[in-house]
Image (cartoon, grey):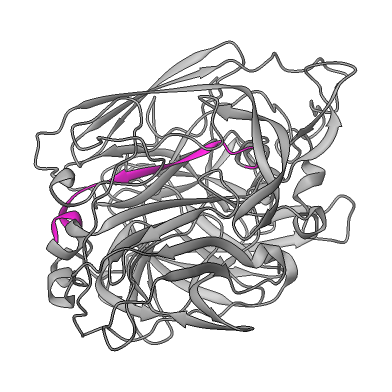
Amino acid sequence: MSPLCSGETAGHLWPAFAEEQIMAYQAPNGADVAEPHREFLEHDKPHEAPHGEGRDIRRAPTDLSFKLELAYATHRICRVTEDGVCKAWDEVKLRSYNGKLGGPLIEAIPGDTLNIALMNRLPPEPDEHSPHVMHDHPMTEPHGFNTSNLHFHGLHVSPAGNADNVMLEISPGRHFHYEVKIPKDHPAGTYWYHAHKHGSAALHIGSGMAGPLIIRGDIDRVPAIRAAREQIILFQQIPYKLVDDPTMPGHQANMVESYDLFGPTVWPTLGRRFTLNGVVEPTYEMFPGEVQRWRFIHAGLREGLKLRWVRRVGDQEIALPQFQIAHDGITTGRIDTVTETELFPAYRVDVMVRATEPDGRPLKPGTYFLVDNSVTGPAHTLARIVVKGPPRRMFLPRPQELAPLAPFKTIEDDDITGHQEAVFSIDTSVTPPRFLINGKPFDPHHARILSLGAVEEWTVSSLNFNHPFHIHVNPFQLKTDDGKILWKDTLLVPAGKTFKLRTRYERYIGQFMMHCHIVEHGDLGMAELIEVVPDGGEHEHGGAHGGGGSDHPEPHH
């Protein structure tokens, strides 16, 4: 597997529209359950969402309550599979939500308020002599492994107070009540939540502290999408290793307890495999001809995925088409036909898949495969798709149905009111290396000041290595090489390449983060504090070398 830090560039596939309507077939389906039970969540299949009448979301917005209890839990992670059957397991002890490998599915509609109780039941932080506590440069070194918080990745919600505030630190033995108000005009789509406390975020995400967050709305009412069964697939990387258990002196356990596990060559060396909703090489089912909606979420650490679903004929793999309808939770208004979906850390892509031949005939019963086209060996196979049963007649959504659902107006040249720049780099001339944005490491006392209501173009580049650029609160507009418009919140920036991204700072003021989503890089300094202030406030814009800004008090605890 090629790590993002390899310096190799990665191309993107943005093929033309799928204009045809292919018939396929409908199957009954269960639904996932998160806390609490919802009227459109009926059964108990992890991260599998309802279809048809079960997805009726025409209800009034309401308050929803969820509980995330953070504590150590022991999980079984498959180490060896044969023909989709696990032959050997590892017992792995991880910091986990609600005792599960991966957090529960949270579903809402625009206008809902998420009330989330985060209860930190981890042990107290180690004493001052522990290597887990860094005293000289705590903002550029790992620290506070048992202190946490939450980030609602991709949501356009307030970054202040007890909402999507990543400056909060919830220490062991404490609990905190998050109240996240989702705007009534929020785009429906695929989002996720994860731990984001600076200095421990990579270790927490590498322990599985992340879960899917789905906002349902207009796109879910499109008849062909409403009829399709969903698979919500959370890809995670758990780079566990046998170590002395810090919670049980004298004992060893497979754990994630060190940043030595996050280097650019460690994952392939360890021989671990991606889990999908906590399972190595799961099996999904489709009826011949069925259409499904797959919501891909990359909740991993570093490695990219090149996702294909294929039939195997001897030693050959023949790719079947995927029909992309959304990126990072934002409906494109198109249906783009691809044979490969690129997924880098924090990316989400919604695709429609159909169990048919190119001419519309239902696929023959048998086993098909979801694979990572960037690697060989056991890690190449991510999941198995068993096609069986009677044919089901269904349809793909029509482009004209999707076109009105693209939620944002294109930002034109004349709309631009200012410019920003972000240059990622790693200074390898020193030991340890320095992880920088615009030549500076993360400083919690300095923020780049932006003006509410501004419409700005960001020039984003990388001097060395590949880095997924991510900014909170406000998504950005990207124009692809073939002229298509995408809205995203995370974008892989290959070494030596420059992107022009456009964004509006709308509705919310307050502080949030911009950082590399190889989360280890962010924890080690490749992050910057951003603050949006009311228009007309005293501020100056940041520039290529940090620019303007202001001093702020320390993050609140």
Above-or-below relation of 498 to 214: below
- Residue 441 appears in the figure: no
Residue at position x 19%, y 72% from top? Answer: 395
Residue at the (9%, 42%) spot, across then down:
58
Q: Quadrant of residue 524?
A: top right
| 293 and 85: which is toward the camera | 85
* Number of marks in the rendered image: 0
Q: Give x and y (percent) for residue 288.
A: 31, 70
Locate residue 554 relative to residue 293 in the image: left or right: right
Q: Quadrant of the C terminus?
A: top right
The percent position of residue 128, horizontal first and vertical second, equals 83, 17
Residue range of the region highlighted in magenta in the rendering: 206-222
Tell me if residue 172 is in the magenta stretch: no
Looking at the image, is 524 positioned above or below residue 546?
above
- Residue 361 lies, with reference to residue 424, above or below; the image says below
State the residue in front, 192 or 84: 84
The image quarter in which residue 422 lies? bottom right
Classify the position of the N terminus by image quarter: bottom right
Name the foreground residue: 507 vs 273: 273
Q: Is residue 157 above or below residue 309?
A: above
Q: Position of residue 305 (x, y in %)?
A: 58, 66
Q: In this orientation, does residue 447 appear?
A: yes
Query: Residue drawn 85% across and 22% down?
Result: 130
What x and y, as percent, mark residue 92? Answer: 71, 34
State left or right for residue 405 relative to residue 327.
left
* Rendering quarter of residue 173: top right
Instruction: Give the camera-side residue of 195 and 323.
Output: 323
What residue occupies the far top of the structure in this picture?
173
